Image (spheres, helix red, strand yellow):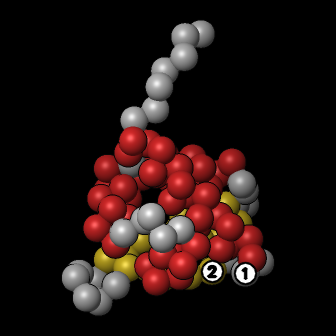
């Protein structure tokens, strides 16, 4: 199987998934994660990048969470200045 280099978006989506997984694991598996908490976990992820990654690379984010036994239940974006929130649960 040939090596396929990852795009920057795929790499950042994986970083987002890992940050979400670390926060969820620290909270015991089920949690709601705000964008502010994500920024504390990984300052390179800006709110604009987070929103774009979830829309464009959601499969990569979900696959990263699945590798750690977690699932993305819900993602809510209330718009600029109001925030985003992720609902993460342990996979059944």
Can you give x and y, in whole percent of width and height, for residue 91 in the image? 69, 60
Side of 35 where 92 appears, left or right: right
Can you give x and y, in whole percent of width and height, for residue 84 in the image? 38, 79
User: Which secondary structure lies at badge 2?
Assistant: strand
Q: Residue at x 72, y 56 (%)?
A: 69
Q: Which of the two residues, 58 or 81, is positioned nearer the viewer here?
A: 81
Where 41 falls versus 56 (above or below)? below
Can you give x and y, in whole percent of width and height, for residue 44 in the image? 45, 64
> Label 1: few (<14), some or many (≥20) within 10 Å?
few
Q: Residue at x 59, y 64 (%)?
A: 19
Side of 90 where 64 appears, left or right: left
The residue labelled by disc 1 is 27
The C terminus sits in image quarter: bottom right
Q: Which of the two residues, 76 or 26, is positioned nearer the viewer here?
A: 26
- State if disc 2 and disc 1 touch (CB < 8 Å): yes
Side of 12 where 69 appears, left or right: right
The N terminus sits in image quarter: top right
Q: Residue furthest top?
A: 1
Is residue 71 in view from this perspective?
no
Residue 7 location, quadrant: top left
User: Which secondary structure lies at badge 1?
Assistant: loop
Q: Residue at x 48, y 70 (%)?
A: 43
Is residue 10 in view from this perspective?
yes
Side of 12 where 19 appears, left or right: right
The residue labelled by disc 2 is 31
Q: Residue furthest left?
A: 80
């Amino acid at each position: 199987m040939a090596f396929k280099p990852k795009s920057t978006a795929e790499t950042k989506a994986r970083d987002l998934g890992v940050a979400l997984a670390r926060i969820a694991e620290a909270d015991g598996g089920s949690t709601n994660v705000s964008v502010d908490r994500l920024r504390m976990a990984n300052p390179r992820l800006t709110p604009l990048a987070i929103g774009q990654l979830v829309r464009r690379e959601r499969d990569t984010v979900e696959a990263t969470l699945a590798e750690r036994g977690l699932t993305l239940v819900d993602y809510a974006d209330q718009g600029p200045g109001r925030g985003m929130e992720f609902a993460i649960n342990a996979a059944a």
